[in-house]
Image (cartoon, helix red, strand yellow):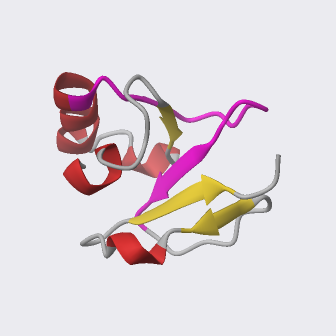
Amino acid sequence: VKKIAAIIPKESIVVFPIRLSQNWSLRGYFARYHAVGLTFEFTPETNYYISDEKESIKGFQLIESLELDGFYFYKRSIY
């Protein structure tokens, strides 16, 4: 969470898959320490996505330089 929060603006919204809905640590650390909200739904304003699986998401690119343990972070690449 610290690595991601260091590269995104405070109060950002990050989409994550519903299968992670019970990951309270992930949700809590983002909200409590970084004022980052998590949601399940993509919108035209969605700029970030986090997952526990490597995925191919149209319009998003994997930020491999973060080297996250067990997670993959994506940023919108097409506006």
Q: How many marks?
A: 0
Would you say 58 lies left or right of 54 here?
Answer: right
Is 47 situated above or below 39?
A: below
Residue at the location (47% across, 71% down)?
Answer: 53
Assess whether residue 47 is covered by the magenta stretch.
yes
* Residue 55: quarter of image: bottom right
The residue lying toward the viewer, choosing from 23 and 34, is 34
> Magenta segment, which residues?
34-52
Horizontal and vertical percent position of residue 49 = 54, 50
Residue at the location (64% across, 67% down)?
Answer: 61
Is 5 situated above or below 40?
A: below
Would you say 52 lies left or right of 41 here?
Answer: left
Would you say 44 lies left or right of 32 here?
Answer: right
Horizontal and vertical percent position of residue 38 = 44, 32
Is 74 situated above or below 32?
A: below
Horizontal and vertical percent position of residue 70 = 29, 71
Horizontal and vertical percent position of residue 31 = 27, 25
Is 2 situated above or below 74?
A: above
The residue lying toward the viewer, choosing from 26 and 73, is 73
The residue lying toward the viewer, choosing from 21 and 50, is 50
Residue at the location (31% across, 43% down)?
Answer: 5
Residue at the location (17% across, 41% down)?
Answer: 25
Assess whether residue 42 is covered by the magenta stretch.
yes
